[in-house]
Amino acid sequence: MSLAVSASAPDCTSPTRAPLGTRTPAALLTMGVEEEFLLVDRHSRAPVGRGPRVIEAAARTLGPLVQPEFFTAQVEVCTTPTTSTAALRAELALLRAGLVGAAAGEDCLILASGTPVIPPEHPLTVTPDERYLRMVGRFPSVVGDYDQVVCGCHVHIGVPGRAQALELANRMRPWLPCLQALTANSPFDRGTDTGYASWRAVEHARWPTVGPAPVLDEASYERIANALVQCGALLDRRMIYWYARPSEHVPTLEIRVADVNARLDAVVLLAALARGLAAVMGLETEEGRPPPHLECGRLREAHRLAAVHGLDGDGLDPVTGARVPAWTVVDRLHERAAAGLAASGDASLVDTLLDRLRTEGDGASRQRGAHRLHGRLTDVVDSLARTTAAA
């Protein structure tokens, strides 16, 4: 699904020829978030396909902001466009509260984890939506019979049009592995510690086109998108699953690298950093600066390291390609987005959230920490459910 997110222009101006380092964005970009959650049985903690009933109950208060996802063991919520991180956080909390209450009525818990911690007791079913069923028919080897369900968190940044979305996607490519590492939250998959911080990244890549976006302008995007559908590689253009893609319905850039996270802080941090980067890179576009060149193999390796380590290991410097601690890359991203964060009033908030994340660890390390206490996967599920509900 897509969010109707667009750019908003407050009453302010920007110098036209000042050096980039002294300039600030003239308009606050809007942002929106989609979160996909897993439904698990309150007693077994295994995934269960009660999504249709939970959505029906939640929609009485949340309306169309709650929607089905690919499997009936999933639900999705989406926020409305906003320029305020405080408003975004409040709406995300409201949506989660509505889901938690609706799920409780069906004897379920809402779980924010990129992959299921405990395997399902019964085969999962695909939501009986015409498009989803066509996807199953077209790509049976991807869906398979092994009940692989993944849950992500997608950020939409408002832009004037598709050309601007593609320009931002080209410029943000080197930094998306860092955003992926910040939000890694799927170390367990159906009863097994995968050895990864984000196993969702591995499983999601089974679908066609999942991966870094190529560097494109609007004309080349149209050619490639049409060709992928015409040759049968994709069912439709909505199946372009690049890590950053223009929406097919509304003027947004959608960033699709993150696992869903139980802590709301992680979601707000992701959205604020993504918007801060977009604001800075919009100024670079105005200056006529070319997008950075990053060799494709190096970029894929950066995403692989983010999936393996999250923040507890090495990443790749997006400029030099050198292997450095993941937190070094985070610090460089923070510096890169600083002007955009200052312009939106989010600099202090991001400082606080990054300090908290540095102290308490990413979602993957917290999941493993919950498991180490007693060696029980049910403890991991309970910790995730409590944190998701507490938001």
Image: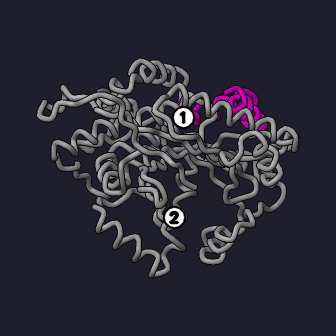
Q: CA distance from mark 1 to mark 2?
A: 24 Å
Q: Quadrant of residue 242?
A: bottom left
Residue 196: within the magenta?
A: no
The residue at 41%/18% (across/down) is 348
Q: Position of residue 132 (x, y in %)?
A: 66, 67
Residue 177: horizontal and vertical position, in percent? 40, 44
Q: Residues within 10 Å of mark 2 (few under 14, many from 20)?
A: some
Q: Is residue 269 visible?
A: yes
Q: Residue at x 57, y 45 (%)?
A: 34
Residue lying farthest to the front in this orientation: 11
Q: Earlier in the sequence, mark 1 or mark 2?
A: 2
**Mark 1, residue position:** 267
Q: Quadrant of the N terminus?
A: bottom right
Q: Which mark is residue 238?
A: 2
Q: Residue at x 52, y 31 (%)?
A: 268
Amino acid type at image mark 1: Val
Q: Secondary structure at mark 1?
A: helix
